[in-house]
Amino acid sequence: RDKDKDNIIRMLLESSSAQETFSVVCIVGIGGMGKTTLAQYVFSDERVKSNFDIRIWVCVPQRLTFEDMIQNMVAFATDETHLQGGMHQLAFAIDETHLQGVMRQVAFATDRAPLQLQCHFQGQITDKKFLLVLDNVWNHELLSRTWQDLVDLIGVGAPGSMVLTTTRSVGVAKTMGVIKPY
């Protein structure tokens, strides 16, 4: 597993020095093989922490809408755990006080308008180098309908930003423009 972790980190750090606004790395494999655990190790690694201004972790349920994904990303990027309104349990964050990568839940409110959420999120990442982990992306058809919206949303980050995705589907990797998934 250490070799896999180092390979993914190398891919992130090499790609993050590029001039593109962001690049995508996909970890593809069957269920239960440890894709999420590998991504957690990468996310928590000191080399990764020191290379990115903001690190965002979003667990992507099968029926996630674009608005839900934005709400998750906003909640994580701003650590808004005390919002009022309808509470959902979709986003997870690495608790920095535990080196083991213990997960803690981040709640988010559903009472904000999608455009307001987008502006708020973009304000958090504008001109900042970020790592966005999209964990457990299943539905490449849904992703194909929302991918360009997500690209437009995160395109305000600093060059060298990265998206790391875990998925069971090669179709997800293709939709995201990944030629060689890990």
Image: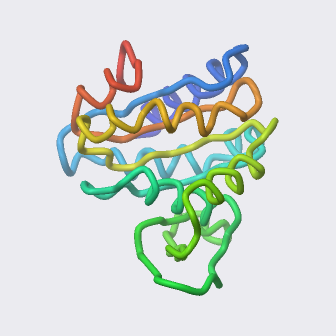
Total numbered badges shown on the rendered structure: 0
- The residue at the point 58 percent across, 69 percent down is 112
x, y percentage for residue 121?
67, 53
x, y percentage for residue 178?
40, 19
Left/right placement of residue 151 relative to residue 123 reads left
The one nearer the camera, 112 or 129, is 112
Q: Is residue 96 above or below residue 124?
A: below
x, y percentage for residue 136?
32, 49
Left/right placement of residue 156 relative to residue 15 reads right
Tell me which corner region of the image, top left, top right, bottom left or bottom right, holds residue 176.
top left
Q: Is residue 75 above or below residue 50?
A: below
**The N terminus is located in which quarter?**
top left
- The residue at the point 25 percent across, 44 percent down is 138
**The C terminus is located in which quarter?**
top left
- The residue at the point 31 percent across, 21 percent down is 174
x, y percentage for residue 151?
54, 31
